[in-house]
Image: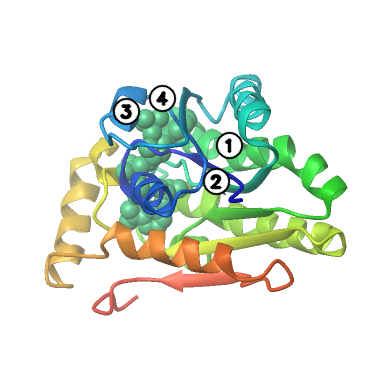
Amino acid sequence: MKKLIVITGASSGFGAAMARLFNANEYPLLLLGRRIEKIEALDLKGEVMIRHADVTNQEELAKAIREAEAKYGATDLLVNNAGVMLLGNVWKQSSKEWQTMLDTNVMGVLNGMQIVLPEMKKNHHGTIINISSIAGFKAFQNHAAYVASKFGVHGLNETVRQEVSGDNVRVMLVAPGAAETELLTHVTDDHALTEYEEWKQSMGGITLDPKHVAETVKFMYEMPQEVNIREVDIAATLQDN
Ligand code: NDP
């Protein structure tokens, strides 16, 4: 019997693509986000629970996960996917935007991991896949606070991987390059947005299709529990940096 998969940020982009793919393969799913009407609009059939959860609110996140576990059994895969990227320069960007990124991209991942790890350690089974970014190991101009948050994800991911490996729990990381999602729609700095679009044009105007990130996550998860694909960096072939 297939086990419970929890996906944060399932309302668009990579999260929605993962939700579709795992649903098509009949995994029981808990799909989380703040805009649950967008998750409902995916119109998935079968064992699917949809709940409102802001990843910065650990109580709300835990409540949704416990409810799904009561119905479908222990979480076997948590995909910490929810994230925001607000481009800007340190000398002029609002610190509120830094805080949103650090709270969502770093605290959100820590919150999710803390909720499922005790049970996974006890069961000697379970997988966490954290969605970081190529901006988690190299710098990009106009991305300082985002880069800081994703370097944070890389760092905490590898630390926890080492800590729980002896419990047979897998912690994995996927670092995508630029992709066609809603990520850019929240950027408030027009100059940074224009530069990003120019960079994208240098790659032919189209970047990575989220479905390939979903396929990668599924492949990593479906390897046997004794195999940990620790990290995958995936980007459009035309992305040169
Ligand atoms: P989208 O903007 O399309 O999706 C982001 C998702 O995160 C949405 O479902 C959104 O749901 C959710 N989210 C944001 N903030 C919160 C919050 N506080 N609580 C719960 N959910 C939240 O972007 P992507 O699909 O591109 O982003 C997914 C991940 O991939 C992110 O971690 C991003 O940093 C990473 N990434 C993206 C790249 C890209 O170029 N697209 C490249 C590299 C990494 P809702 O608003 O409904 O809550």
Which numbered mark, 4 or 3, is in the foreground of this view? 3
Residue identifier under label 3: 40
Where disc 1 sits, the SS reads: helix
Hey, what amino acid is under mark 2?
A: Asn
Q: Which residue is mark 2?
A: 80
Q: Are marks 1 and 2 in contact (CB under 8 Å)?
A: yes
Q: Residue at x 52, y 54 (%)?
A: 150
Return the residue nearer the eye: 15 or 141. 15
> Is 170 rendered above or below residue 240?
above
Secondary structure beneath dot 2 equals strand
Tell which of 33 and 227 is nearer to you. Answer: 227
Question: Whole-Å distance between the Cαs marked 1 and 2?
Answer: 8 Å
Q: Earlier in the sequence, mark 3 or mark 1?
A: 3
Crowding at dot 4, Cα within 10 Å, few <14 / some 14-19 / many 20+, comes out as some
Query: Does mark 1's beta carbon lie closer than 8 Å to ligand 1?
Result: yes
Where residue 67 sits, quadrant-wise, is top right
Ligand 1 within 8 Å of the CB at mark 2: yes
- Number of numbered markers: 4
Helix, strand or loop for disc 3: helix
* Residue marked by disc 1: 108
Mark-to-mark CA distance, 4 and 2: 14 Å
